[in-house]
Image (tube, helix red, strand yellow):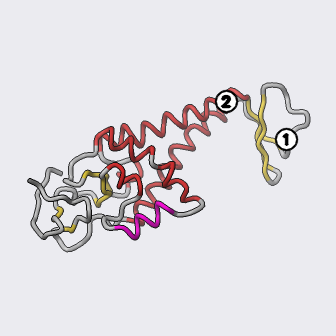
Amino acid sequence: MAPDLRSHPSPVDGRDPTQVGTRRCFAIVIDAFLVAVIPLVTVLAIGHARSVRECPDPLPSGRSCVAWQGNGVVVENRSIVLFFAFLALLYVVVFVIVQGRTGASPGKALLGIRVVRADGTQTGMFRSFVRAVCWVIDGISLFVPIALWTAWFTPGHRRVGDFAAGTFVVRAGTEGRLRAPSGAEITTRG
């Protein structure tokens, strides 16, 4: 029977492979930029967008306007629906499909970190889906840094999504070299 690593994996080489908080922060910024900018550029390109200093009054039929501090844009209403649909699709592709199959979103891959199960194996689609859904809770970090606090101060440096999915975020290359809390070395596929 394999030891339970969910409480806190210890590294074989003396370094905690889950202590990747800074990398995780930069990875989510990269991923958020990717997931948000692609739909935004698409909408601006096909939504007949035009720049304005302030929203026109009355607003043309079938159009919406967003303006702030003298800069704004008027787009077709259907483009807003397209933006949110494309945003949701990219979110699922990046955080469920790609991360579930490879263990890393583009930001995580770029920064050399991976999401793994407690035994070091790939998370799969279901666990990646659970982590993605839990961003509803972790995403509150815009106001109260729940994800940041839990990733800094919990054993294994896990956010709520990691606890719910039974996953860890580790430095790439360390996923198969974890040690059980009792000190027994475990070799897993990596």
Q: Start and end of the magenta stretch?
A: 146-154
Q: Secondary structure at mark 2?
A: helix
Residue 129 position, x and y percent, is 39, 41
Q: Is residue 168 magenta?
A: no
Q: Compared to 68, does 51 lie above or below?
A: above
Residue 7 position, x and y percent, is 26, 63
Q: Is residue 109 left or right of residue 26?
A: left
Identify residue for label 2.
Answer: 79
Looking at the image, which residue is at 35% across and 65% down?
A: 157
Q: Amino acid at mark 2?
A: Ser
Q: Is residue 41 left or right of residue 104?
A: right
**C-beta proximity under 8 Å, tags 2 and 1:** no
Looking at the image, which residue is at 76% across and 40% down?
A: 73
Looking at the image, which residue is at 91% across and 33% down?
A: 58
Q: Secondary structure at mark 1?
A: loop
Residue 96, image quadrant: top left
Residue 102 position, x and y percent, is 29, 43
Residue 81 position, x and y percent, is 64, 30
**Sequence-first tag of 2 and 1:** 1
Q: CA distance from mark 2 to mark 1?
A: 17 Å
Q: Amino acid at mark 1?
A: Cys
Q: Is residue 148 magenta?
A: yes
Q: Main secondary structure of the magenta part?
A: helix
Looking at the image, which residue is at 28% across and 40% down?
A: 124
Identify residue for label 1.
Answer: 55
- Residue count near mark 2 (Cα–Cα under 10 Å), binned few <14, some 14–19, many ≥20: many
